[in-house]
Amino acid sequence: MNPYLKYCLLLMICCRGLTGWAQQKPNILWITIEDTSPEFIGCYGNKTAHTPNIDQLAKQGVRFSNAFSTGTVCSPSRTAIITGVKTYCTGTGHHRSAFPVPGFMKGFPYYLQQAGYYTTNAAKTDYNIREEPAYIKEAWNESSGKAGWWNRKPGQPFFAVFNFNASHQSNTMTNPYDRYVKAVLSNLDKEAIIADDAFEMPPFYHDTPEMRREMARVYNSLSLTDKQIGKLLARLKADGLADSTIIVFYGDHGEGIPRGKTNGIDFGFRVPFVIWFPEMYKQLSPWGTGIVTDELIDFTDLAPTMISLAGGIKPAHMTGRAFLGADRTKAPEYLVLSSDRSDNGPDLVRAVTDGRYFYARNFMSWMPQLRYIRYMEIGAIKQLMRSDLEKGALDPLQKSLFEPRPAEFLFDTKTDPWETRNLSAATDMRSRLQQMRGHLEEEMLSVKDILLLPEGEMDTLSTYTTPYEYRLDANAYPFHKIYAAASLSGFRTADALKKQLALLNDTGRIVRYWAVTGLRAQPLAALKSRKARLLPLLDDVYPPVAVTAAAILYELDQDAKAKDCLTRYLLGENQYWALMSLNFLLYSHDKKPFIEPVQQCRAMPGRSYAAKAACMDFLGSLDLVPNDFNHRE
């Protein structure tokens, strides 16, 4: 061979090798949007939606039909994303609670940095942990509204997150309509606007012109979101990076309208999720491209998956699995999910899904699906629903959203996508119910769900340890005993009642708390003859026990001592016990005697946002303050 040609050939081989080495690690672009369910996006089958950019990513990439947030409100879901750990292990399930996590539990972009990546976030954090600024600084090279791939070193791979909030609940239901017009409609071309009569109304909403005007906000806010995503994709292409960047698109939890966000059913958890692979990295997709996969994933899987793609090592504390890269593991049969307090509205739901069937265990079942949450109450759509309820205009399904929940839900989302039929009592579903219930119990006992502690208890222990570490101390946290009491809560049976009454004498304060919490869900008729057993609890040394017992006794016959007990904690210094008292009063049948104490509580200096919001919900339910955006407090 001619020596010159031989030299050129060798040079070409070397250059190709260098190019392949330089491009060995893909760039990764995350596009996250807020408060969105798959049902409202075109590629998931909604023919009304205007989401062409998202749809194109799905057409050319991989669309996940079974992707789930681990929580139903933003900050807990983001804790799970950034840590790769379930919030019922970290103790971060309550919305904006800011409890500490162990020092070894770093935000996962830190591990990408160790693998050579430039990490940027534009710009939402909201990780729901203590000392968040330091946590952010360690995880990200840049975290601001100006952050992006453009400041990295030449040739350095990047991991860049862009969060779009046009679809946030503020636009879809909470802000006044004129603000929505200015923020959303005025920024859309005429052909991108969805008319009020163009879509199918979910059956759990009363189909009226007023409700349709509100529901159209969901579609148009997503239309604007898609437009913004298109601009980002155009910049990626203009910068010559589209052919070397894997794109991940997803929503942070379910749709931000009543019965979605904050509610522990499939509609609150299931999210749109798409991964687009450029030609250079198509071999990294185990499913191929231009395809739909029903593989189960949840948000704790994202951290280990990104670390796997980057060539890093997954930390031992991460509970999720990698579904891409060299460390990919098999998909599970079930996912376990959780939903806890959102703003002023407490809850404890643990859920199991296999993608089709969705099981939800409601531990605080006396509260309805549409419980009082201030940020929901100020939205016109929630006010329309409450107004129609008062008028008797709702059908049985729509009305049921305001009624106490059963202890368990079981929905078949394939035949009943809007979750209108609870199958938990169906004879032919007994085996499936028992299997999913058993899987949940096994998970809770295995990880020692720390959120079975009252939130005030976690605040106290966080002064000297972390909830994550505390749960592992069997002496401090005798979980099996606590779970045995909590597992009865919500079931309205004579057997459960008998066991709960016996547990009121337990020496363990958390056991007593769950015994009396379970009694709150029992029918009042079953408790009237047990009043003598409950009265001594008003003096219990553990405030959550006394408050809960007082709530029950007040509902029985407006007992004066119970009223005094609730008032004492309502006006006390402890924010958590005040909030607990308020949330019981929100569901009382006789609120009027508490008007003055609640007004005093609201005016107290230093009251937490959650406590003030609960006060406003209480007063708003009696028409003593307006329920609108300008009175959100």
Image: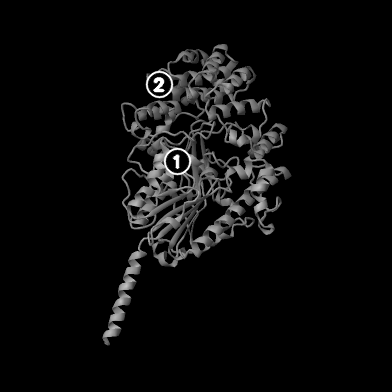
Q: Secondary structure at mark 1?
A: loop
The residue depicted at 71 percent of the width and 34 percent of the height is: 392
Type of residue at label 2? Arg
Q: Residues within 10 Å of mark 1 (few under 14, many from 20)?
A: many
Taking the spot 31% from the left edge, 75% from the top edge, the residue there is 13
Q: Which mark is residue 509?
A: 2
User: How many numbered marks, from 0 up?
Assistant: 2
Q: Please tell me whether residue 632 is drawn above or below residue 238 in the rendered image.
A: above
- Foreground disc of the pair 2, 1: 1
Q: Name the quadrant of the N terminus.
A: bottom left
Q: Nearer the viewer, residue 239 or 545?
A: 239
Distance (Cα) linking label 2 and label 1: 30 Å
Side of 26 relative to 492 (left or right): left
Q: Residue furthest bottom?
A: 2
Vertical comparison of 205 with 225: above or below: above
Viewer-proximal residue, 493 or 445? 445
Give the residue pinned by disc 1: 127
Residue contact at pointers 2 and 1, CB within 8 angstroms:
no
Looking at the rendering, which quadrant does residue 310 occupy?
bottom left
Seen in the picture, residue 106 relative to 622 is either above or below; the reply is: below
